[in-house]
Amino acid sequence: MQTDVPESGDREASEGRAAADGPDGEDLAAALEGLREPLFLCDGRGRIAYLNPALRRRLGVPPGDAAVGCPWESLFDGASRRLIEREALPAILREGHWRGPVALGRAVAPAPVFQLSLSAADTGGLLGLLLGGENEGAGPEGGLISRAEARSERLEALRRLAGDLSHDLNNALTSILGFARFLREDLPKDSQPHGFAGQIALAAEGAKRRLDEALAFARPGRRPGQAVAVGPVVAQACATLRPRLPDGTALDVEGDQDLAVEAEPQVFAEVLRQLLANAAEALEGRAGRLEVSWRLAEEPGRLPGLGKLGEPARVILQRQADGRRLLVAAGAPDPGRRFLELVVRDSGAGMTEAVLEHAFEPFFTTREPARGRGLGLSCAFGQALGQGGAILVDSAPGQGTAVRLLWPAAGAVPGEAPAPGDATGPDTAASAARRRLPRGRGQRILVAEDDLVLREALGEMLQRLGYRPLLVEDGERARHALAGGEAVEAVLTDRRMPKLSGTGLIEWMRAQDLHQPVLLCTGYGEDLDPASLSRVGAVTLLSKPIDAATLARSLDRLFAGQG
């Protein structure tokens, strides 16, 4: 095993970048290149396939250096290599993941201590993410940097990476759904191509649901919610789950039917569904007991492991007073708000400390791929913290698990509404296509979108809804159009564009005393606070992927508000 990365060789750094150009191509490569945390990939033979620029800077490795192709352990100093050989490699073989302190072998002095998060890839290689990097504590043979900080930084890095990738995936889904709808509208209803278009739409809707599950972690729920009665949501989730439980399993439900949360109905229902599915899987096919309960939380800030309002988010892992159970917690609930406490408890296998360490990370699972995607707790984590709440998980091997959510409580539920998540059957896409949508009256809409296919799809949607679209390829072109006196009644803009972003365009418009209402589209995993956007005038947020029904109703409300 080498102690240093060799200096010789003629392989270019671009070959390392090529390793990142898999199915997601240039978009994935760009996301990795832009990541602030040092990252490396190695192939199934244990050879370095890619070093991102952040790691090259830390190593002092120039772009032309022949690091690619060397053993990946050669990145680290002798003590770190011994730790990797002793602990990391057995953990990778056993659990597929390892985290521990390391120091780089060629780091620019003084050598910092990182937390290395190492995961096995399906292709047989490894992905390594280096977190921290400050000169805190001792090296690999001594103390650790703050585990809470490393845990939180790792989650934040994953959140940013997932958000980057979501932007392009949502663009593609909007285009697929849009053009499938156009085909169904134009083709004879009894023709085979009409049926094919319907199947395309159904497949894209399924992909959208899966993407929403994954992005619940990256796109926290800060959008304005409504009062959602907890009882009916729990009843529906339990009714769906019961047929899949092992014979003899008890499912106990207890809670005040008058209590409600402030949430997007579909989001809250999905979080509960994921938690119940996790609890059922923990039984491992044996009869047991599941419990779901809810009540108003009493002094939520006094719960163990939670931070104080305004502090940086931390994920705390600590041992309970009984010395047997462990608790992992995150969140800093506002003491001035009321919270509902929802608990999902199971009598299943429980979790070890090594598993709890990664409990909130998306796609981390100890189950077979067919039995879980590792999204349940990460979904609840992202949404609860996004709402200003908290999540606590306590568990022990062989003693079951309890997941406790703190979610903002709401007042009375206005009227009766359909239960969230109701299935509408296999003809959902066809029914939606036939539904009568509000139509425009020829208003001119400026559309700023850098994705060509999506731009054309949005333009076609607008035309079919009775509007006149003016299509431009980025925020800068939109600014030129408005500055040149183009008469438009509204602006539809992507949030993330080259040259001038959607929010940059809005700020410029208001500075120029242009007050057209704006629809701001985002599929990007970042926090966009509607309250702050309201300060720049009439701005409505639209989540990608966007369908014709959502676009039609948003524009109708937008123009109705002007009248």
Image (cartoon, rainbow, N blue to C red):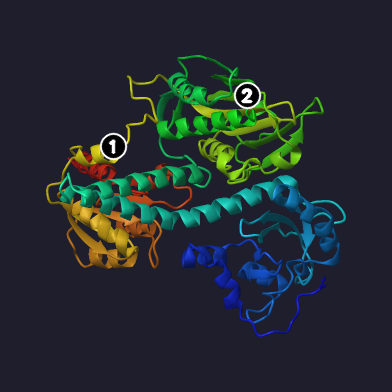
Task: Name the secondary structure under disc 2.
Answer: strand
Residue at the left extreme?
Answer: 441
Judge by depth and name the residue closer to the eye, 166 or 309: 166
The residue carrying pointer 2 sits among few (fewer than 14), some (14 to 19) or many (20 or more) residues within 10 Å by Cα, namely many
Q: Amino acid at mark 2?
A: Arg
Rendered location of residue 82, percent (x, y): 85, 61
Quick check: can you spot residue 489?
A: no
Nearest the viewer among 539 and 413 is 413
- Give the percent coordinates (x, y) of residue 122: 61, 56
Observer-nearest residue: 78 or 236?
236
Numbered tag placed on residue 427 in the rendering: 1
Side of 87 where 417 appears, left or right: left
For the residue labelled by badge 1, is the local secondary structure a helix, a strand or a loop?
loop
What distance separates the C-alpha of mark 2 from that of mark 1? Answer: 36 Å
Q: Residue at x 69, y 26 (%)?
A: 400
Residue drawn at point x = 26 percent, y = 57 percent: 457
Query: In this rendering, would 285 be left or right of 244?
Result: right
Residue 40 image offset from top left, x and y in percent: 65, 65
- Which image quarter holds the N terminus? bottom right
Q: Quadrant of residue 447?
A: bottom left
The amino acid at mark 1 is Asp
Residue 345 tag number: 2
Placement of the C terminus among the 4 image quadrants: top left
